[in-house]
Structures are given as C-alpha cells and as structure tokens.
Image: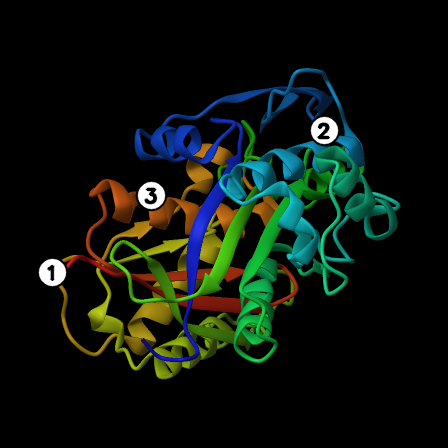
Amino acid sequence: MSAHHIAIRNTGLVTAVGLSAPQSCAAIRAKITNPTETRFTDSAGEWIMAHQVQLAQPWRGITKLAKMAAMAIDEALQGIPRGTWGTLPLLLCVAETDRPGRLTGLDDKLFVQVQDELEARFAPSSTLIARGRVGVAVALAQARKLVMQGGVPLIVVAATDSLIHGPTLSHYERSDRLLTARNSNGFVPGEGAGALLVGAATGEPSELVCRGIGFGQEAASLDSGEPLRAEGLTQAIKASLTEAGREMHDFDYRITDVSGEQYYFKEAALALTRILRKRKEEFDIWHPAECTGETGAASGVTVIANARAACSKGYSKGPEVLAHWANDAGQRAALVLQHSVSP
C-alpha cells in the first residue's frame, strides 16, 4: 500500500431520509425522498419545499447544525474510547464565507457547541474549513498530510450545513435556482451532517481507500456569464487520476454532489468527454442529492459514505469510484476511491 494513501474507517450521517449512515444510505439506495413544506414562501406565495432533518425538538440555526454534527461524529467514532477523543483532530467543514444568508457566528460558535454537545474536546490541531461543497475534499487532503507527515493515526472529518434559512432561500429563489412549480432548472434545499473516521490505509480487505485527490478552479462559474467548458472540473479530475495512476476508463461509476441544476450536470458531462479516451458500455453517475436535497458542505460526506456503503453491501458497480464536487465560487474537487477486496 502506497505511503500516501488514507482510508475511510467509519462513517456517520444525518440526513432528511435517515439519522444514521445505514438508514440514510439504505434510503438513498431505494431512491426515497422526503421533501416537506418549510416556513417560507416563494415569490408566487407557494410554500418552499425542502428536505428537512427531523430531530427530537425543532432546533434551528447553529444549534441544529451542532446537534446534527454531534450525532454524526458520535456514530463515526463508535468503538473509539471516548477518553482518547482528545487526541483526534477534528476537521469541521461548513458553508463558504460568501454563502448568501450565512449564519452569523458560524466560525466562532459552532466548533465549541459541537464539542459541548459531545461532552468532549478534540486535539489542538482541529480546525474549521469554510469551503462549502468542496470542503470535505480539502479536509481529506489536510487529513492525509496530518497522517503521513504528522504521524497522527486517526482524524475526524465532519461537515454540517443547512440551506433552509430565510435569507438563503430568498436569495436562491430570486436567482431562479430553487426547484419550484415555475422553475424546473433548480434544486431542492436540504440540510444534514456527516462524519468520516480517517486513518492510514493498511491494505486490509474491505477498506475504502482514497488513492488520489485533485483540485481545480472554474472560470466560467454559474453566474459568470462565461461559456462553460468544464476546465476546472477537468483539471481536478486529471490531478486525482495522475496521483492515483488511473485513467478515466478504469472507473466503474461516478458519484457526485449534483443536485438538480442543469449547469452542474452539463459540467460533469463535458468533463467526461474531455477525459474519457476509451469507450465504455455504461458509466453511471450517482447523485445522492436527489434524495437528501442540496446540503452544501454536508454533501461531501454523503457522497463518500454512500460509496462506502455500496461497496461494503455489494451493490456497487465495482471497486473503482470517482467522486467529484463543485461549489458556486468555481472551486472543484475530485477523489479517486478504491474498495479493496479479499484476495
């Protein structure tokens, strides 16, 4: 096993279709959705629909983000003695700083509230990563550096996010980006949280190994007005392939954060045509957001947890998986994932 590979040891998920990773992944596999009316209306006076996480009480704002994150982290750390949690760095991914309607105090309060919910403290090297949908990939790159260069055996990568916030919904509705009765080219907002327990790959059977990470920047972002050529996503995928020693045709399927907008589906298709050099009979693209809604930073863990569940449960298209993400600021990220099988 190459020295720069890390593996996903365990996962935790909180979504609108399940309050644990097994529940959420089973629901996504079955294509179950659960959109419900929010407290907000669109410009036509219709209730905005969203994929809302139902907790024990109707918490909102940073409190709900913290509680969802704590649930996911607690699940991912099952089997890890609580007394050792203080040695684990926590890389917590949240909405990007320019997200419309971003919650005030997110950078100052959330991390403390997550620790308070868990009644635990994490290592001083813990940090907050405000990169939206590409945040988990950024966190995994940092985790790999901590494992390989810092000698840290285990790291927690977590994410929590919600687009179900009045100013956020209002912005996206005015921009014609929400899926409504009047707009078919849009997404259904959602919320959720997830966590990954990450460590050095050991080569043991049934590990989901991250073999390559790549990043890119798309100049023709969603609202730039520039013609889309998928240059940023192509750059990210090529970088991950180079690092992993793979070609595009080696993969069995793709899994991504696309959530309904034509721009991002078009980008994924364009990137494929620019990189794929051998004909494949089929090349599925999975998008869990069809069941969870657009969950922002939390989509990173949702994608990886679903890939891991598919491989471990035997319903994956194969052991070689390409995952990729894109945020509105033009940042792109891609991961090469491989599920090791018994000899």
In this view, the mark in front (2 or 3): 3
Question: Disc 1 residue type?
Answer: Glu
Which residue is painted at 31% across and 75% down in the image? 1
Q: Position of residue 6 (x, y in %)?
A: 44, 67
Residue at (35, 49) in percent of width and height: 308
Q: In this view, does 147 lie to the left or right of 244?
A: right
> What amino acid type is highlighted by mark number 2?
Ser
Q: Mark 1 points at which residue?
A: 281
How is the model colour-coded?
rainbow
Q: How far apart are marks 2 and 1 (CA)?
A: 44 Å
Pinpoint residue 89: horizontal percent, then vertical percent: 66, 59
Out of 7 and 307, give the one closest to the viewer.
Answer: 7
Q: Where is residue 29 in the image (x, y as percent from the top left)?
A: 31, 34
The residue tagged 3 is 309
> Element under label 1?
loop
Q: Are marks 3 and 1 in contact (CB under 8 Å)?
A: no
Q: Residue 183 appears in which quarter of the rendering? A: top right
- Looking at marks 2 and 1 on the same chain, the residue that comes earlier in the sequence is marked by 2
Asked whether residue 256 is in view, the answer is yes
| Separation (CA) of disc 2 from disc 3 | 40 Å
Q: Residue at x 59, y 54 (%)?
A: 156
- Which numbered disc flags the more N-terminal residue, 2 or 3? 2
Q: In the rendered image, which quarter is residue 295 located in?
A: top right
Instruction: Name the quarter where the C terminus is drawn.
Output: bottom left
At mark 3, the secondary structure is helix
Q: In this view, does 301 lie above or below 48?
A: below
Q: What residue type is labelled 3?
A: Ala
- Tag nearer the camera, 3 or 1: 3
Q: Disc 2 designates what residue?
A: 43
